[in-house]
């Protein structure tokens, strides 16, 4: 009989990988960049310059200007940002404006985005820059079909009623 090799000994590749994993230190967080700009640079950037680096759909939406509802939302954002800078925890900003583009000044603020039925709580992170608010509050529920009811199909005529 041939002797079978064991791969779990001290010299095996698997044990060496385990040892290497133990030696690795804590992971460092990579600084966030959006299209080559850091978050600090984005926050200092004028809105016209920011419009140039966002995707075309968002740029077109921003170029049209803001509606009165969006203007009200901007005022709420500025007020919440002032509170956050003072060290106070800002209240959730509730809005129906799902078509508002997320700008760098909105990062870190809590939002309640209306999905047609209720307000979905969202805390915006850096990766959300340049997207719409509505993307974070789905307005449609996923349908899970069950068994068909009486009269749903022609074949249901022959299904016994319980």
Image (tube, grey):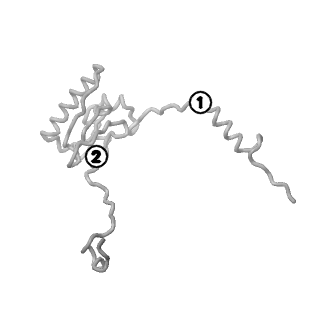
Q: Position of residue 120 (x, y in %)?
A: 27, 42
* Quadrant occupied by the N terminus: bottom right
* Quadrant occupied by the C terminus: bottom left
Neighbour tally class for label 2: few under 14, some 14-19, many 20 plus, Cα within 10 Å: some
- The residue positioned farthest toward the top in the image shown: 86
Which residue in the structure is indicated by mark 1?
25
Instruction: Label 2: state its secondary structure.
Output: loop
Q: Is residue 158 above or below residue 45?
A: below
Q: Is residue 155 above or below residue 100?
A: below
Q: Nearer the viewer, residue 86 or 67?
A: 86
Horizontal arrangement in the rendering, residue 36 relative to residue 86 (left or right): right
Instruction: Label 1: state its secondary structure.
Output: loop
- Confirm whether residue 145 shows in the render: yes
- Confirm whether residue 99 shows in the render: no
Residue at 80% from the left image edge and 51% from the top image edge: 5
Q: Is residue 62 above or below residue 89?
A: below
Q: Which mark is residue 137?
A: 2
Marks 1 and 2 close (CB-CB < 8 Å): no
Residue at 15% from the left image edge and 36% from the top image edge: 71
Disc 1 and disc 2: Cα gap in Å?
A: 37 Å
Q: Position of residue 87 (x, y in %)?
A: 30, 20
């Amino acid at each position: 009989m041939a002797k079978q090799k064991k791969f779990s000994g001290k010299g095996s590749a698997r044990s060496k990988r385990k040892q290497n994993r133990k030696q690795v230190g804590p992971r460092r967080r990579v600084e966030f960049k959006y299209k080559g700009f850091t978050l600090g640079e984005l926050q200092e950037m004028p809105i016209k310059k920011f419009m140039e680096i966002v995707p075309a759909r968002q740029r077109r939406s921003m170029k049209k200007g803001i509606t009165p509802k969006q203007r009200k939302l901007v005022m709420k954002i500025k007020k919440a940002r002032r509170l956050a800078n003072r060290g106070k925890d800002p209240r959730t900003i509730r809005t129906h404006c799902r078509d508002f583009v997320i700008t760098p000044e909105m990062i870190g603020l809590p939002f309640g985005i209306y999905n047609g039925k209720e307000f979905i709580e969202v805390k915006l992170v850096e990766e959300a820059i340049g997207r719409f608010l509505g993307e974070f509050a789905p307005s449609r529920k996923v349908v899970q079909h069950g068994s068909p009811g009486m009269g749903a199909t022609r074949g249901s005529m022959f299904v016994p009623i319980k």
